[in-house]
Image (cartoon, rainbow, N blue to C red):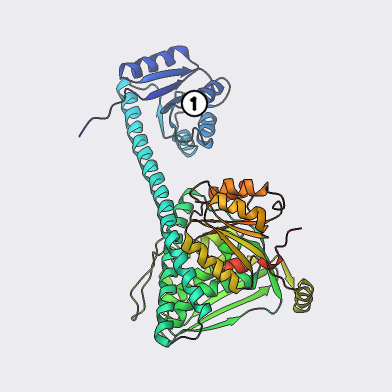
């Protein structure tokens, strides 16, 4: 095993006592370290930002800022939080002082006077740990990059597959049972692949704190319908009975439509997975005071009392039905809890025990309740219309399938397969809506969007970004480029319908 070299390690030695600072610097330099010095807390913070040292040897008693506060500030800043801090003190030498320093972010705490060999050994030990941490962070970063690339590459073929099957179902709804079964098999397994990809990406996002919500006023039935659609094929294949009870009134909540549908969808998938064939699943929603209560129940295998406290932990799985091998990654319920809490809600599980089914209850704050007579009048006032749409994608199969589906819904649709072609067609066709793929061969979709906004008559067009990348940064780039919506491949056609394309008339 090769011994670790410390010749490139930079140590920032912070001490207002010139003699003590000199002595420690001399010991460290003799051990092969590069040493820079600071005599105050403010100077230490500035030099840490400028020089990015590997470790700060930090005395507690400084003339301007207490050393423990310097440590806290270093660990609080994004640019310096990874810098190691070895706190030292000749004044604060009690156990409580050491605990306070470590809880404040210090990586270690030594009482002075310190023997030279002890100082060097502690610095080397911390640098070894720091190098391992950096390597792990680098591996973690590369893992996230790999997952994002994998998701993009998987989404590209999954998109046209799912869209093509939906088109076949619409063009020829009455087919022999064998053909219908084949269609449903493709849809079911495509949906399963999409869910696995999304779950893996969400694990990476949670670990990095990168899950963010795109909040708007969302009506209950819209995200319930999306959730039901995601599980319909699996439930039908297992001959499950799904009993749904929803309020007649419109119930609005403040939240992210996609994530709300994911919450309910994950609970429904969980119920389907752990309920034997021919079982019953209940989906109930009601308003309780200022809260929306959503319950998903089943008569499946149930949950033991010892499992109720851990069922929402990451990668937790518990049993499987006798007619179905255990599948999934044990991620779904953990995501449910995270997403519910991000919506300022709560979730809990209950069960009478193994073999007696289970119930999951989600509570979310209610934004508004609109009664049926008001809804009917609004629908009567809105009327209907047809939108003129331009679909832009260099994947010809994906573009043609999406255009065909939109045409079936009565829209006028044209297709372009490159950025320049899209700009040319926009100038003459003047679409109301544009579905624009980001990864085009001649220019990025972001550039096309910016240039299309400059085309006379296209200033108010409703533009939808299509991409295989679903990270928060990708959404931000889409908004900055002038897109109104960001849709991740493979396209959920129910999500497209929820955009109300017929109302997207340029003003």
Picture coordinates of residue 379 (x, y %)? 75, 75
Which residue is at a point 52% across and 46% down the rendered structure image? 443
Question: Where is residue 344, by image quadrant?
Answer: bottom right
Residue 52 position, x and y percent, is 46, 27
Q: Nearer the viewer, residue 116 or 39?
A: 39
Residue at 40% x, 71% y is: 189
In the rendered image, residue 38, in percent from the top left (x then y), is placed at 49, 18
Give the vertical position of 400 relative to 228 (above or below): above
Taking the spot 68% from the left edge, 46% from the top edge, the residue there is 454
Using a 10 Å C-alpha cutoff, classify the residue at mark 1 as few (fewer than 14 neighbours), some (14 to 19) or many (20 or more): many
Outermost residue on the left side: it is: 1
Nearest to the observer: residue 21 or residue 444: 444
Q: Where does residue 427 sit, x and y in percent of width and height?
A: 66, 53
Left or right side of 175 for 139: left
Q: Could you tell me if residue 356 is visible in this image?
A: no
Visible in this render: residue 31?
yes
Report which residue position mark 1 lands on: 48
Quarter of the image containing the N terminus? top left
Viewer-side residue, 108 vs 167: 167
């Amino acid at each position: 095993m090769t011994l670790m070299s410390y010749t490139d390690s930079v140590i920032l030695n912070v001490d207002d006592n010139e003699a003590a600072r000199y002595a420690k610097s001399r010991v460290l330099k003799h051990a092969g370290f590069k040493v820079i010095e600071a005599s105050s807390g403010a100077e230490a913070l500035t030099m840490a930002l400028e020089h990015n040292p590997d470790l700060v040897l930090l005395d507690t008693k400084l003339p301007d800022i207490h050393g423990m506060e310097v440590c806290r500030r270093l660990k609080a800043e994004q640019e310096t939080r990874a810098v190691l801090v070895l706190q030292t003190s000749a004044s604060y030498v009690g156990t409580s002082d050491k605990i306070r320093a470590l809880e404040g972010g210090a990586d270690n705490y030594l009482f002075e006077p310190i023997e030279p060999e002890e100082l060097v050994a502690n610095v080397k030990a911390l640098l070894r740990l720091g190098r391992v941490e950096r390597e792990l962070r680098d591996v973690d970063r590369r893992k996230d990059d790999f997952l994002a690339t994998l998701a993009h590459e998987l989404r590209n073929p999954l998109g046209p597959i799912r869209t093509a099957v939906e088109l076949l179902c619409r063009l020829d709804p009455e087919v022999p049972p064998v053909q219908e079964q084949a269609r449903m098999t493709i849809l079911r397994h495509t949906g399963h692949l999409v869910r696995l990809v999304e779950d893996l990406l969400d694990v990476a996002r949670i670990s990095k704190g990168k899950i963010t919500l795109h909040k708007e006023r969302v009506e209950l039935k819209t995200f319930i319908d999306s959730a039901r659609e995601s599980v319909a094929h699996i439930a039908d294949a297992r001959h499950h009975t799904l009993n749904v009870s929803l309020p007649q009134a419109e119930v609005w909540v403040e939240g992210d439509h996609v994530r709300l549908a994911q919450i309910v969808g994950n609970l429904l998938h969980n119920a389907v997975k752990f309920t034997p064939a021919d079982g019953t699943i209940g989906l109930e929603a009601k308003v309780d005071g200022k809260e929306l209560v959503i319950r998903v129940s089943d008569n499946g295998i149930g949950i033991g009392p010892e499992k109720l406290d851990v069922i929402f932990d990451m990668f937790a799985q518990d049993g499987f039905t006798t007619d179905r091998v255990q599948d999934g990654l044990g991620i779904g319920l953990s995501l449910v809890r995270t997403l519910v809490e991000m919506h300022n809600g709560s979730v809990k599980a209950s069960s009478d025990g193994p073999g007696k089914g289970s119930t999951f209850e989600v509570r979310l704050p209610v934004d508004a309740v609109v009664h049926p007579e008001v809804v009917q009048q609004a629908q009567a006032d809105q009327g209907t219309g047809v939108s003129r749409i331009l679909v832009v994608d260099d994947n010809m199969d994906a573009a043609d399938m999406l255009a065909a589906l939109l045409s079936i819904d009565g829209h006028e649709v044209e297709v372009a397969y490159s950025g320049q072609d899209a700009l040319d067609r926009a100038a003459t066709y003047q679409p109301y809506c544009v579905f624009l793929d980001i990864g085009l061969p001649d220019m990025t979709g972001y550039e096309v969007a910016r240039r299309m906004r400059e085309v006379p008559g296209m200033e108010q067009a409703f533009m939808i970004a299509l991409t295989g990348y679903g990270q928060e940064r990708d959404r931000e780039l889409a908004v900055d480029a002038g897109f109104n919506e960001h849709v991740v491949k493979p396209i959920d056609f129910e999500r497209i319908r929820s955009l109300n394309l017929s109302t997207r008339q340029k003003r």
